[in-house]
Structures are given as structure tokens and as C-alpha cells.
């Protein structure tokens, strides 16, 4: 009987440590970054947690803007510090309220990361005013663009992943043009 109680106690402690770790990771910020507020915005609610199909439909349109890569100490490719690109994300209301669309990147002050000039929107959602869009690039890089939509203007951030690791992050600013 004592080993059963011990197992319950160990399980409770393990779950407590796991919960504390997850909460600690969710609340951490990147200190020392000149783009800290944008990076905080990049900590997105997963795109699939949108509040309703109607909210997603309100996202439909052409969003044009720019990205600016972070210069944080942990930057994957330091030569991309302050890399600016022109980004256009076209969102279309698909079947059953699911958003689809396309991504286009153009030269700003540097080429688009790994020459990914196009991509496909694979998920998008809206939770309150927070918009979140996941884009899959031709080389399997996945980027999440997220921000607060105020009067059809986005102020937020982006994170890009390849092989499960973070390769770039920064700020994202966009305006709905259509």
C-alpha cells in the first residue's frame, strides 16, 4: 500500500513540475532584443483556436506589409539581423469556414529567407482581435504570423521554423489593402 501512495505522490510532483515548466516557458520574454514587443506578439495562440467561422471570414482579404528580422543574441543567422522583406498574405474563406490562401515575399533590404518567395496558408484563425496565420514554404519552412488587428492594421510578429527549430523571428506590420 505504501508503494501505491508513493507512486501517487511522485506522479503529482512530476505533473506539478511539468505545469510549472510550461507556465514558465509561456511567460518568458526575450530580454536584450531590440524587438522585444514584437517578439512577445509572436507568442501566438495556435491558429486553429479561432473563436468562430464568422471571425475567420472577417480575416479574408489581402494583407500587405513588412517583416523585420530580430537581432537577438540567439539569432540563427546573424547576417539576417534587421533583414526587411515586403510580405503579402492573401486570405480566402474556404469550405466549412476554414481559411486558405497564399503568401508572397519580395526584397526589402535583403532577399527573402532561403529564397522562399511564395508559400501556402495552411491555417489561419482569429481569437478576439489576435490574428494568427501559418504559412508553409516550398522548402518546408513553416512561419507563423500573428498580431493584433486594429482597424485592419496588424501590429505583431513572426516566427519561422525548419526541422522543428526556430530559424528566424521578428516584427510583422501589415495593412488590409483589399
Image: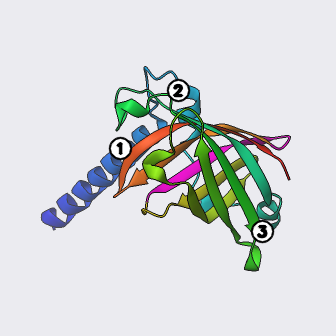
User: Relative to residue 176, is residue 133 drawn left or right?
Assistant: left
Of labels 2 and 1, the one closer to you: 2
**Residue closest to the eye, 7 or 136:** 136
Residue denoted by label 2: 36
Dot 2 lies on which element? helix
x 50%, y 28%: residue: 82
Give the vertical position of 170 relative to 34 (above or below): below
Residue 56 is situated, as x and y percent measured from the top left of the image, at 76, 62
Q: Which residues are magenta?
A: 141-152
Residue 163 is situated, as x and y percent measured from the top left of the image, at 33, 58
What's the CA distance linking mark 2 and mark 1? 21 Å
Dot 1 lies on which element? helix
Residue denoted by label 1: 21
Q: Which numbered disc, 3 or 1, marks the residue that appears first in the sequence?
A: 1
What's the CA distance linking mark 3 and mark 1? 33 Å
Can I make out residue 68 in this image? yes
Amino acid at each position: 500500500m505504501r508503494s501505491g501512495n508513493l507512486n501517487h505522490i511522485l506522479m503529482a510532483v512530476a505533473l506539478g513540475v511539468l505545469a510549472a515548466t510550461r507556465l514558465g516557458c509561456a511567460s518568458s520574454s526575450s530580454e536584450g532584443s531590440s524587438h522585444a514587443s514584437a517578439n512577445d506578439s509572436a507568442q501566438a495562440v495556435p491558429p486553429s483556436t479561432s473563436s468562430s467561422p464568422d471571425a475567420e471570414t472577417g480575416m479574408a482579404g489581402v494583407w500587405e506589409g513588412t517583416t523585420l528580422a530580430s537581432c537577438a543574441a540567439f539569432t540563427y543567422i546573424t547576417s539576417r539581423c534587421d533583414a526587411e522583406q515586403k510580405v503579402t498574405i492573401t486570405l480566402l474563406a474556404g469550405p466549412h469556414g476554414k481559411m486558405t490562401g497564399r503568401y508572397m515575399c519580395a526584397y526589402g533590404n535583403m532577399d527573402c529567407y532561403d529564397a522562399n518567395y511564395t508559400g501556402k496558408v495552411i491555417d489561419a484563425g482569429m481569437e478576439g482581435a489576435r490574428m494568427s496565420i501559418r504559412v508553409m514554404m516550398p522548402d518546408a519552412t513553416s512561419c507563423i504570423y500573428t498580431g493584433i488587428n486594429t482597424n485592419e492594421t496588424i501590429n505583431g510578429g513572426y516566427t519561422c521554423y525548419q526541422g522543428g527549430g526556430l530559424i528566424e523571428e521578428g516584427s510583422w506590420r501589415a495593412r488590409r489593402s483589399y
